[in-house]
Amino acid sequence: MLTNQANFKRDGVQDYVTVRATAIIMTAFTFYMLWFFLSTPTVTYEIWHGLFSSLAMKVFTFAALVSVMLHIRIGFWQVLTDYVKSTGLRAVVQFFINLVAFVYVAVGLFVLWGL
Amino acid sequence: MQLSFSVYRYNPDVDNAPRMQDYTLEVEEGQDMMVLDALIALKEKDPTLSFRRSCREGVCGSDGMNMNGKNGLACITPLSTFGRKKIIVRPLPGMPVVRDLVVDLSQFYNQYEKIKPFLINDNNQPPAREFLQSPEEREKLDGLYECILCACCSSSCPSFWWNPDKFIGPAGLLHAYRFLADSRDTATEQRLGDLDDAFSVFRCHGIMNCVSVCPKGLNPTKAIGQIKSLLLQRAV
């Protein structure tokens, strides 16, 4: 899936599946974090650090960040091909959006495993 | 009672820009008529007003237009639908205007042509008389074959507005599924192969404008969902 998503040429079926799969992961992560905040009266640094110290949570968070990146990549490609008809402008906008999405993943990676 | 109309007028040979023209029509109290009948009456007063119509009974699909913001067939839309409000009539959205309410449907027909709207049967030995279907097989075509290609659905679809050259559109895809679902058609693989890209089918995001406006009560979104499902099954 990742190799395919790195291609320039979009694939309808792959994008269709990827958007839905990443949406499930992002929703699960959102609900998990929501549950964490609702069930924790006071969020201290120790509790916050503890939450992300387990390997499972690191992987879950990383999966959510990669999902955001893929979701953004496909979603914005669809929106931009609808509304931005100039190929050059679209390429530039897409480049920066993909760059920002990648930065989120890269920073997340260092934060998760660098603490 | 007097009914007010505001009709889109544009003659590219004469006008620099489109404009809305107001008309009034005297209708007997308690009497109802179709929008097409009203337009015909208005045309008697102003012969320069142009629109398409043919069968006048919702079968040919010639008089698709936008009435008070919703696409439909003028010949089967009663004036009473709009109460006593001013009736605003515009051409089908997203289509190039030829004149007034007449639009150029070339892009719509090009997409329809792409789906090969005819039965393909490659069996070497065709039956002597006819291809037989069981009642169950025939039933699968219900809700698909009734499309009259009025373009109300495709011209209400934002994906078709933005990509009329790449996205087949709801009408074309409804017809595509009509042949995919036909037990007599043997070109399923070829048909799915032709649709397997990022635009032809997958530009449909299921907003269901097509279902909302279809004058025949059909459900193109459901048919598109079936095509997506077939493409998915083919890929895995």
Image: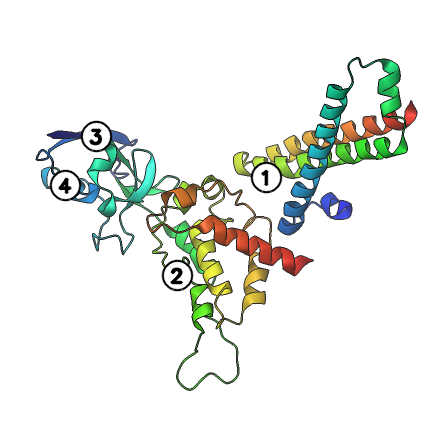
Give amino acid for label 2: Tyr
Task: Provide the secondary structure element on which disc 4 rests.
Answer: helix
Disc sitting over residue B43 in the figure: 4
Q: Earlier in the sequence, mark 3 or mark 2?
A: 3
Same subunit under labels 3 and 2? yes
Q: Are marks 4 and 2 in contact (CB under 8 Å)?
A: no
Q: Nearer the viewer, residue B165 or A48?
A: A48
Task: Provide the secondary structure element on which disc 2 rests.
Answer: loop
Same subunit under labels 4 and 3? yes
**How far across and down, in percent of the image, does residue B189 sit?**
59, 66
Q: Nearer the viewer, residue B110 or B62?
A: B62
Residue denoted by label 3: B21
Q: Nearer the viewer, residue A101 or A35?
A: A35
Disc sitting over residue A78 in the figure: 1
Direction from residue B122 to residue B88 in the image, left or right: left
Task: Provide the secondary structure element on which disc 1 rests.
Answer: helix
Give amino acid for label 4: Lys
**How far across and down, in percent of the image, does residue A7 sit?**
72, 46
Give amino acid for label 1: Gln
Q: Is residue B124 above or below residue A39?
A: below
